[in-house]
Image: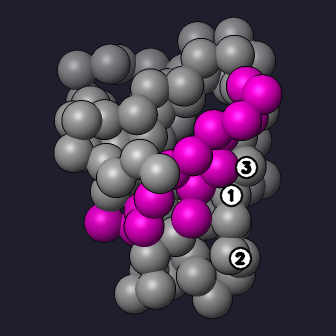
Amino acid sequence: MDLIIKAIPEIKRTQDPTQIPWKDAVVWVYNGEGQYHWLGKEHIRSVAWTGGNVSIMPKETSILRTFFSCFILMSATVFVGTNVTAA
């Protein structure tokens, strides 16, 4: 995950859950490493899930859209904020 965060600074990381904008982000814990990762709603068009995998579609206006059309999370723990659009 470290390489992805270096390449995509829009993905944030912290060990302190009080720093996370819970209502305005998709938050996940990667492999129980004790760190939270999140992507803010300003980059998210919609979120969907199937079979335990969470798909994040970037907004057309997000820089992330120039790199990919979908971001798939395969994490045991994912939180979708109440202000994030779910499909």
Which residue is found at the position 41% from the left and 47% from the top? 86
Specify whether 9 is left or right of 70.
left
Q: Which mark is residue 83?
A: none
Residue drawn 21% across the image and 45% down it:
83
Query: In terms of image quadrants, where is residue 70?
Result: bottom right
- Determine contact: label 3, label 2, CB under 8 Å: no
When the figure is inspected, residue 67 is found, relative to residue 5, above or below; the finding is below
Tell me the distance, in whole angstroms, between the alpha carbons under discs 2 and 1.
7 Å
Mark 3–mark 2 Cα distance, whole angstroms, equals 11 Å
Amino acid type indicated by mark 1: Phe
Residue bounds of the magenta highlight: 42-57
Would you place residue 51 above or below residue 46 in this image? Answer: above
Q: Amino acid at mark 3?
A: Ile
Q: Are marks 2 and 1 in contact (CB under 8 Å)?
A: yes
- Bin the neighbour count of mark 1 within 10 Å (Cα to Cα): few under 14, some 14-19, many 20 and up: some
Res. 68 mark: 2
Q: Which mark is residue 72?
A: 3
Q: Is residue 14 magenta?
A: no
Residue neighbourhood size for the residue with mark 3, other residues' Cα within 10 Å, grouped as few (<14), some (14–19), many (≥20): few
Q: Is residue 52 magenta?
A: yes
Q: Do the numbered discs 1 and 3 sit on residues whose CB atoms are within 8 Å?
A: yes
Q: Which residue is mark 1?
A: 71
Q: Is residue 21 visible?
A: no
Task: Give the CA separation, mark 1 to mark 3.
Answer: 4 Å
Q: Position of residue 16 (x, y in %)?
A: 34, 19
